[in-house]
Image (cartoon, helix red, strand yellow):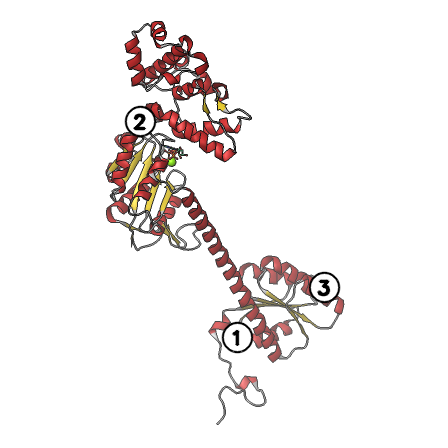
Amino acid sequence: MSDPEESTPGGIEAAQPRRPDDSARRYTILVVDDEAAILESLELTLEDDYRVLCAGTGAEGLEILEREDVALIIADQVMPVMTGVEFLERAIERNPRAIRMMLTGYADIGSLVRAINEGRIYRYIPKPWEPEELRLNVKRALEAYELTHENAELAAALSDANERLSRENLYLRREVERRYSFDQLLGEGPAMQRVFELLEKVAQTDATVLIAGETGTGKDLAARAIHYAGSRAKARFLAQNCGALPETLLESELFGHKRGAFTGAHADKKGLFEVCDSGTIFLDEVGEMTPGMQVRLLRVLQDSEVRPLGSADTRKVDVRIMAATNRDLRKEVAEGRFREDLYYRLRVVEITLPPLRERREDIPLLAQHFLDVANQRIGRELKGFTQAAMERLVAHSWGGNVRELENELERVVALAGERDTVSADMLSDEIRGQTEAAAAIGAPPVDWHLSRSVDALKAHMILAALRETGSKSQAAQRLGIPRQSLQKMMKRLGLSDADVEPENSD
Ligand SMILES: Nc1ncnc2c1ncn2[C@@H]1O[C@H](COP(=O)(O)OP(=O)(O)OP(=O)(O)O)[C@@H](O)[C@H]1O
Ligand SMILES: [Mg+2]
């Protein structure tokens, strides 16, 4: 009994039909030779196992390379017009991954070396060749091709994974740095005390929270505080600025996408809602969302499921949603820019952070805190503020709120040199120079809220009178009001005698 796998003795190839193997035939081989007979015989040797394309000149070969996905190129060395070496060199530009082999009729060592060096040739085949040997060589070459192909894919996958890991690390590091508790949110005055009470209450629930407030009032900080004080604290807190990305990218960032959903979507991607699993998503600048995104977000809030871009399936998600805005969303709703139904879904609980100018009583505490932080960071030892400096900090309108105060102190400390106390001359021009009185008389007021501006002006005048006269009775006299009224006014405005510059008071 003969083994069916064994080849027929005598090696009569034609008598044994070769079974075209579909897995091998997926490879395309390009053969280039100016002699038709050689092309034909190469084709005959290889066509059962591979798809063979023939070219009679280098130029024709290059043309084929432009449009075909070729795995292996076999070129004759000696051809008129474009030599084999020249052709293979140019082939590299068109298809760098294809394996290159050279047919050589005679062993001219010099041109062979050049061919191997410059054409970066995998192997050369001497003419005439043994069909079996040629097949074996081609098979090996294609195994090498397959390997480099796999390697390239693995390398791409690896670099993808690395990138994801480093992003993950960055995220973790940032979160560790930012693990906030309520005591990172400072505020002694009644306005912030009310905010703290509310934050504590909502932290114990899973309600959707809308945090409103001007820029720099601490919305971010408040959202993190709620997350880390609540039952989802062990899961992630992921923030996404909704104003930072065009619609499609924001949608893909939040809900994910299927490969090919849009140009540049090379692979499936999970959205933040899925990644966040049982954590909190913080949608910053939610007022910037386009109408289309508003509809999609509404669906998530209603059904707790997301549908990745380009996908037909939805996925359940378990995520707490918080949103922030520095726009007046109610007004946006009234003016038709923000969906009313979404607004009500988002503001199950609404927390408004008051602007700093409405809680000036917190300024000394915040200023001292940011001074300490900046001292630490920059390596200085500034101890505190002169009364005049603090007075100006308290009187400033702080359009950028707490962030502006923080930046101001960072700047002051950085430029402090050898000074050990912050005095008024170290403050920025607009803080040092701007008095509410000047604003009231000259330029339009920074803050159009009348009673607020009047209060600021009163505080400024009272402190100036106290500093100049050195006593409350004289200050009251100068201001043209009874001493008791001055005292009441100071109490209401949160001013104390200590607010007067020591060198000017007695
Ligand atoms: N009550 C506070 N106590 C201490 N630091 C605060 C307080 N509020 C804000 N900050 C600090 O001020 C800066 C701005 O705060 P945050 O980023 O939370 O403001 P925001 O309201 O989110 O601003 P934006 O609208 O510009 O995004 C941060 O560095 C934050 O640590
Ligand atoms: Mg913010």
Q: Is residue 432 left or right of residue 115?
A: left
Three-letter amino acid code of the residue under disc 1: Asp
Residue assigned mark 1: 49
Cα–Cα span, label 2 and label 3: 84 Å
Instruction: Classify 208 as above or below 274.
Output: above
Which of labels 2 and 3 is toward the front?
Answer: 2
Specify whether residue 335 is in view. no
Residue assigned mark 2: 189
Quadrant position of the C terminus in the picture:
top left
| Residue name at image x 45 percent, y 47 percent | 170
Lower position in the chain sequence, tag 2 or tag 1: 1
Coordinates of residue 489 in the picture (x, y in percent): 30, 14
Coordinates of residue 402 in the picture (x, y in percent): 39, 29
Question: Which of 157 and 279 lies nearest the eye of the viewer?
Answer: 279
| Residue name at image x 33 percent, y 51 percent | 277
Q: Mark 1 and mark 2 in contact (Cβ < 8 Å)?
A: no
Question: Which of 16 and 222 lies nearest the eye of the viewer?
Answer: 222
